[in-house]
Amino acid sequence: MSQPDTPAAEAPADAAASASFATASASALPALRDRLSTRIISLSLAVLLVVLAMISCTLWLSWKLEGAGAAINDAGSLRMRANRVAIELTLAQARVPNALAMQVQALDTTLAQLKKGNPARPLFLPDEPAIHAQMARVTLDWQQRLRPLALADDGRGPDQYIAALPGFVAQADQLVGMIEHDSARKTDWLRLSQAALAAMACVGTVAVIYLLYLWIILPVLRLQDGLRRMAAREFSLRLPVESRDEFGTLSEGFNRMAGELQDLYQDLEARVAQKTAELERHNRDLETLYDMAAFLNQASDGESMARGFLERVMRQFDAEGGSVRVLDSRHGRMHLLAATGLPAALTEAEACAAADACHCGDATRESVVAIVDLRTAQRRGLASEDGTQCTRNGFQSLAAFRIESQRGAAGVFALHFRAPRALPPSDRQLLETLGQNLGTALEHLRLSATARQLAVVEERNLVAQGLHDSIAQGLNYLNLQVQLLDAAVARDDLAETRELVPMLRHGVEESYQDVRELLNNFRSRLGTGELRPAVEETVGRFRRQCRTEAALTIDDDGSGRPLSPEQQLQVLFILQEALSNVRKHAMAAHVAVALRHGREFRLVVQDDGEGFDPDELATRADAHIGLNIMRERAARLGAQLQVQAAPAHGVRIELILPVTGQARAGTEMTQITETQP
């Protein structure tokens, strides 16, 4: 049911499309008409039409002259043929039969062709009425007067024909003269048209050159001159728009370009100055950041760091006062770390303040708090207690920035100004970055202090372990012997006294040796590749200190990663501790030390001494600090320490450093090597 309605529905759309197409075509006509190509094509067509018309006229005149020439020839032959008829009439007794009729027929044919014309020859009379009238008279004179006389059978025909012949010849001569006159006139027209064609060619050439100069060359020269003057920065130049063709469009575009360039270069100096100022500001900011980073890296304590930071920031931003506070997030307080340019009363009042009671505390949450005029904020009820204090001390504006570290807000630093001061976004960003640098430096100080404290604690722990395992046991033994000696002296037991004195002397010598060994262990420092000579020296010293025979076996095939100096030192300490235990407790006759460095690093110390019971040792772990020290050092290495012991069967201690531990050691060694000059 809807199909019949479809054409009707589409008809308005088609009509609208046709109307829009017609409108677009109509609007496009002026543009097409004004195009330079349209004018050049029109001029060429006009010149072509004129030239073709002139050539056609010349050809037409030539054709007419050729036809008139044939007509003159045939008209002139009328006299000859009329005379031939007279001759045939005069010599009728000796003439060829039908010769007269043939001459009469030839003359009739010539008259007929002159009257009718023959375009094929060509042959035709000129289109002058007088010539056609004369032709009619010649034809009438022949047909009505001469031809009947020529064909008459009586004897008077030849005489009358000859008497009338001069009049016919005169009429024919007049016809020939009229045709010749008309031909001469047409020849003049032909010459005149040729001269006109030559003149038109000259004038047309000059006109075409002039028009091409006006349409193409002159606009191109104007554009060239305009470009040259634009290159000389003459941006006020505008080209005249004298046409609506392509060059007119180019001129309009050139003028728009000149206007835009003029607008761009009018404020070029201002923008150059602005960019120069921005570049100087960026350089100043970079110099400030570099100077601040260098200072923060050299500062030794937080107070001097904060004070130097404030001095540099205040000098950079022309601030009259400044403060640095650290945040105690646990108690919600802010403690003044350093202050410069602030009155003593204000410094004492803000030495310790609640974090939520001041604008500086707000900066720890909002990153930046900038108050241009504290007096205005105070009148509006927006100023806090510290803002009131600042106003009382002559400060009119305040800017506070958060000190931020990896743990979050670490504090805040503030700049105080005695005049209203608004910080641009670039200065705020720089101050925020400086706050982050200060927070990082303070965090670095804290971590460095913590690291030093841990190092001291660790060193003290090692010293304590060494003292407890060596000197403390020797002193305990000496203390016991001294008590026995004191009791023997009290009893006046000289024999026991004589027995105890050598034991005391031996204990003192052993304690002295322990002290020397402990000092030697603490002074031990190894570099990469120095483990083997250090092991050999340690085993040699063991041989000199006791009578136990020591055998050393080192198998290093070079397939394993080298150990770092720290790992080598820990391995040496474990070896020294194991040999010390053999010397002090094992009562062994032989000890074997085997070091194998392949894909895994292994250190084995095995003796044939008295040994011990591992279960009993587990119940008395605190009494065997040396074994605990070795386990702690192995854990620090990431190695495994295995202890195998049995009463009267000696002790076997094996240290195993897996491949992963060696890889970590190799990486650490590479990093250390790369940082060395």
Image: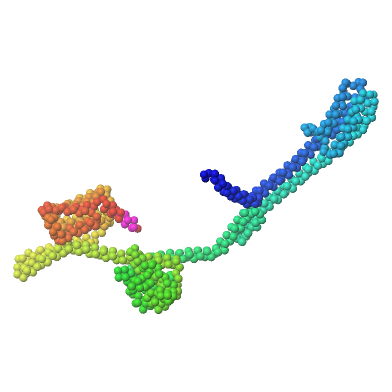
Q: Can residue 667 be seen at all in this image of the molecule?
A: yes
Q: Residue at x 94, y 30 (%)?
A: 163
Q: Count how many numbered circles sit on residues in the image.
A: 0
Residue 520 against residue 138 in the figure, above or below: below
- Can you tell which quarter of the image residue 136 is in? top right
Residue 241 against residue 281 in the figure, above or below: above
- Can you tell which quarter of the image residue 536 is in? bottom left
Q: Nearer the viewer, residue 653 or 217?
A: 217
User: Which residues make up the magenta segment?
Assistant: 669-676
Q: Nearer the viewer, residue 485 or 136?
A: 136
Q: Can residue 374 be seen at all in this image of the molecule?
A: no
- Can you tell which quarter of the image residue 380 is in? bottom left
For the rendered model, the colour scheme is rainbow
Q: Is residue 235 left or right of residue 356?
A: right
Decide whether residue 671 is among the magenta residues: yes
Residue 319 against residue 169 in the figure, above or below: below
Q: Is residue 478 left or right of residue 299?
A: left
Q: Nearer the viewer, residue 432 or 466?
A: 432
The C terminus lies in which quarter of the figure?
A: bottom left
Q: Nearer the viewer, residue 227 or 536?
A: 227
Q: Residue 549, percent across and down?
A: 15, 53
Q: Residue 477, percent across and down?
A: 12, 64
Q: Is residue 194 left or right of residue 366?
A: right
Q: Residue 535, percent across and down?
A: 22, 54
Q: Residue at x 56, y 46 (%)?
A: 8
Residue 431 against residue 668 in the figure, above or below: below
Q: Residue 220, percent across and down?
A: 64, 53
Q: Is residue 240 left or right of residue 503?
A: right
Q: Residue at x 80, y 35 (%)?
A: 66
Chief secondary structure of the magenta portion: helix
Q: Residue at x 87, y 36 (%)?
A: 134
View extreme (front): residue: 1
